[in-house]
Image (cartoon, helix red, strand yellow):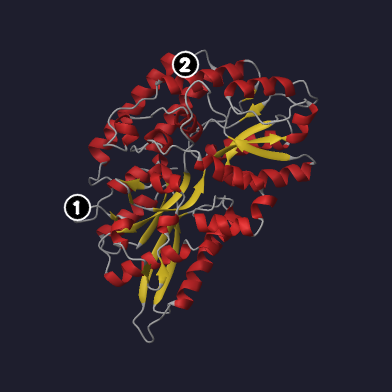
Amino acid sequence: MTTTAGAAEVAVDVWLPRHPEVPGYLSGIRRVAASFHDLHPEYVITIREADVGTLPEEVRAASLQGRPPALVQFPHTTTQLARDMLSGSGTPLFASVHEAVAGRREILGHPVVTGDILAAARACYSSDGELMAVPSLISTTLLYANTDLLAAAGVTRLPQTWNEVEGVCEAVRGLPGVSHGITWPNHGWLFQQAVAQSGGLLADHGNGRRGRAEKMLLDSPEMLAFVGWWRRMHRQGRYLYTGQPVDGESVRQAWEDTFSAFVEQKVAFILGSSAEADRLARAGRERGFGVAAGRTPYSGRFPFAGTLIGGDAIWLVDGLEPDVRDGALAFLQYLMTPAHVAERHCDTGFAPATGAATKLLTAQGWFEEHPQAAVTLDQLAASDRSPAALGALIGDLTRIQGVMTQAMHDVLLGEEDPVWRFASANAEAQRLLDEYNVRGRGGPDCGNDPPRRLR
């Protein structure tokens, strides 16, 4: 690996969404940027944070002014928006990482490692087999269990299907202090996971992966099966609904309320993010009970397809000067080296994104000490990488998630018929999708939506 003495300084700007709930992430990526600069003094990697709701707007404004960043990290819910965003000249704002690498095996002396990204994550951010963006933060949902409560109820293994969850929840409800069997937040990600596991779609054209999504499918058999099971669990007292509102900043509070119910041992199970595994295990130790992680339970009525990838991906801006482009690509490869990926996993709880990092952590004995991390990788490896399992590519996904959660709130706390209510939700989601496809689809307003759409 070589550097160019006395070379002119090349600025590579990297813009990230603010993640205050992810300890160690920003400091970790800053360390990687600093060490990259030590190797390449002519390159200055500047890390800038922005609010997740305003980041697309800020990126587009900078592009129109002729000073876009080189790399932008977007949450998975904004993937379609990133694909649709246009530069001031009307061309796609972001380049295909695959095309930019152009078959090279190394860039500025750094081996190209994007081919080693976990298969499910790579497929999630690919189009026609070509990697569009690099997934830097990877998560999925897991089932967490209080092993002491399970032992007291005579339960010896974690449930795998919805029917098994019902049975175990009934068994633990009679224990002292336990009010319900399981909890999870009323959040759009959980709907998407359940539908994906069952091989269902949220939108036509293969979830928007075989052509632009034009028709919403929120009232599909797979969706209604999940909604019906959820409602039955709630009515039978097996599921604890915290009753938090489901929009805006209160989303985080809804996750925290379910976390508190699990830590206080009001429930034996919680469905949560795989990135929360260490936090839940640590909370259990502090309260004197064991915590085990298992795969997210699935319907059992439909063939299992897989669980979705959550987290963020880094996109490369198109039209950069060659030295800036290669500096950005080299930094991406450096960020994804086994040691850095493994370090990021240990710091943040997000899954190691490459096979080499997984091998490194295995050799270090990490998965023996943190078996829940291995469960995450096993679950992701079980994906059939179908359009269902990869999740939906649709515009305005965040607000469409809000439509789903409001409908479920009405079903749980009111007397709304699930079939009728989700037909109504589908009509509202269709309106949002139509609106996005007409006005936001790469046009002058693309990336310039009000922040509430993206939170």
Inspect this view and state whether residue 24 appears. no
**Helix or strand or loop: what does disc 2 sit on?**
helix
- Compare residues 294 and 191 and report the one nearer the observer: 294
**353 up-or-down from 227: above or below:** below
**149 up-or-down from 86: above or below:** above
Residue drawn at x 25%, y 62% as measured from the top left:
319
- Compare residues 169 and 299 and report the one nearer the observer: 299
**333 up-or-down from 94: above or below:** below
- Compare residues 110 and 429 and report the one nearer the observer: 110
Write down the quadrant of residue 4 in the picture: bottom left
Inspect this view and state whether residue 262 appears. yes
**211 up-or-down from 71: above or below:** above
Q: Position of residue 53 (x, y in %)?
A: 42, 47
Q: Position of residue 257 (x, y in %)?
A: 63, 35
Residue drawn at x 64%, y 33% as measured from the top left:
270
- Quadrant of the image for the C terminus? top left
Task: Give the residue at the far bottom of this rendering.
Answer: 6
As drawn, the label of residue 418 is 2
Q: Callout 1, which amino acid?
A: Gly
Q: Callout 2, which amino acid?
A: Pro
Q: Is residue 83 left or right of residue 194?
A: left
Residue drawn at x 33%, y 27% as measured from the top left:
216
Of callouts 1 and 2, which one flags the residue occurring earlier in the amino acid sequence? 1
Q: Which residue is mark 1?
A: 90
